[in-house]
DNA sequence: GCACTGACTGACCGGTCGGTCAATGTGATG
DNA sequence: CATCACATTGACCGACCGGTCAGTCAGTGC
């Protein structure tokens, strides 16, 4: 926990860097630590140390620990939202779209692990609602978008009528979330061979689901 | 957080109850609180209060907070293990077995919510390994048992050869874990209709998977 | 020169944390 | 009754928590 690193990042930039330099360093440090260990397990001292500022300065830029956490979560949610937006491309056949969604969704989760962990932790924790609103909105739009894709496919007859789109969406997202959460554990099991190859996991997932989804095999 | 409840549970039993009365009350209180809020967010004072004893007495029966947590987790794991053992009944056809497993597994998770939350939290947390060994063992045996069922079904030709048993097992367990974790969130989504009916969720899950699994639809 | 501002800091606050300890009560054994 | 083992307790400790505060300092406008 002792990291007095980066006392001064780039001394040559002291004039060119904006006044918000410290604020951004604090946000970055908080993002890392909150994502890694959660709200309770991170102290303002630790954040200040990693950001290279004093604890009092953190309170100068953010009125409370909760405020800082909300700021971090808001940024994470907006970044998450941006990634999700470019997921539902309307091109191609339904099967291709679903395969694409499966691969892209998991890949985007793994791409910025910190953000995913941050949002997921806040969303699935049942403690005091800190910023559950933001996280739930992101998750909700993600979910609704997927349901929409499935429903449109269902109307065109590319998805069996008996299938509940919300159930299938839950299964798709749940499979990705579970992979994200448990890959470190699954890695220890001899039977599991896909923990290091998420794209293979996505492909197998789509394969299993499709052959139960397609109306005519 | 103020619950001075049960100062004396049953005063008539003071003699009939064994000397380990306090120990059991401490374990019960710790189980509840740890399952509800996790290790860090629970103080020894809170546990002592709920158990109706002094904090010093808790330290008399358990040498440290970590020790108490491990004791709770050990019990939870053994109970979890007992429930899992009666899951893999060898009777019936493969399809029925898989349907049965899907329903029973989720039901057993929901039956003792505290235990499930406790084990899952410890297992999926990436912080310091408190008792990850125990939780991982339980989860591992659960997983291995399911893989075994699937493999035997595959040998008899009741499961497509292209299917990776470990992948299918991950999907089955992951679907249940995700449902368990996110049902409070999913409940807020208008498209979702199964949050209050886990047996319907299990049935739909089996339905989707089977029609992709069965070699001849 | 001077007033003003915002970034920044070390020292400090009340409170809670996990953990310790000497003292007291109690029940069984002799 | 004396003794011993053990359950139980309130008082206490140092460490750390989130948060506050008085004050330093560099830059800016007049």
Image (cartoon, coloured by chain):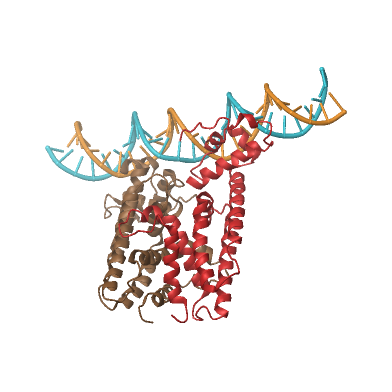
Chain colours: A brown, B red, C orange, D cyan
Query: Is residue A216 visible to us here?
Result: yes
A122 vs B51, left or right, is left
Q: How many marks?
A: 0
Foreground: A155 or B68? Answer: A155
Percent position of residue B7, x then y: 55, 30
Q: Quadrant of the N terminus of chain B?
A: top left
The residue shown at (62%, 40%) is: B24
- Residue C16, placed above or below residue A206: above
Dividing the picture into quarters, in which one does residue B51 lie? Answer: top right
A134 vs B65, left or right, is left
Percent position of residue B111, x then y: 51, 52
Dividing the picture into quarters, in which one does residue A54 lie? Answer: top left
Percent position of residue D14, x then y: 56, 34
The residue shown at (33%, 66%) is: A165
A42 vs C3, left or right, is right
Q: Quadrant of the C terminus of chain B?
A: bottom left
B79 vs A5, left or right, is right
**Farthest residue in the front direction?**
B92
Foreground: A216 or A71? Answer: A216
Query: Is residue A8 visible to us here?
Result: no
Foreground: B168 or B210? Answer: B210
The residue shown at (52%, 51%) is: B112
Percent position of residue A126, x then y: 42, 48
Foreground: B92 or A83? Answer: B92
């Amino acid at each position: 926990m002792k990291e007095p690193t980066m006392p001064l990042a780039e001394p040559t930039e002291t004039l060119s860097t904006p006044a918000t330099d410290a604020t951004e360093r604090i946000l970055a440090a908080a993002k890392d630590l909150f994502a890694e260990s959660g709200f309770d397990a991170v102290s303002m001292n630790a954040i200040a140390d990693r950001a290279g500022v004093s604890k009092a300065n953190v309170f100068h830029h953010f009125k409370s620990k909760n405020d800082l956490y909300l700021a971090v979560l808001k940024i994470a949610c907006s970044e998450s939202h941006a990634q999700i937006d470019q997921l539902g491309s309307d091109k191609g056949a339904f099967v291709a779209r679903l395969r694409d969604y499966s691969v892209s969704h998991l890949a985007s989760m793994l791409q910025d692990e910190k953000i995913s962990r941050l949002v997921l932790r806040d969303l699935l924790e049942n403690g005091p609602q800190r910023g559950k609103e933001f996280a739930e909105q992101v998750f909700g739009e993600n979910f609704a978008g997927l349901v929409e894709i499935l429903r449109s496919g269902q109307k065109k007859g590319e998805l069996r009528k008996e299938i509940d789109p919300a159930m299938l969406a839950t299964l798709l997202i749940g499979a990705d979330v579970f992979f994200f959460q448990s890959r470190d554990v699954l890695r220890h099991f001899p039977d599991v061979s896909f923990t290091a190859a998420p794209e293979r996991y996505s492909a197998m997932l789509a394969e299993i689901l499709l052959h139960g989804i397609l109306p005519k095999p």
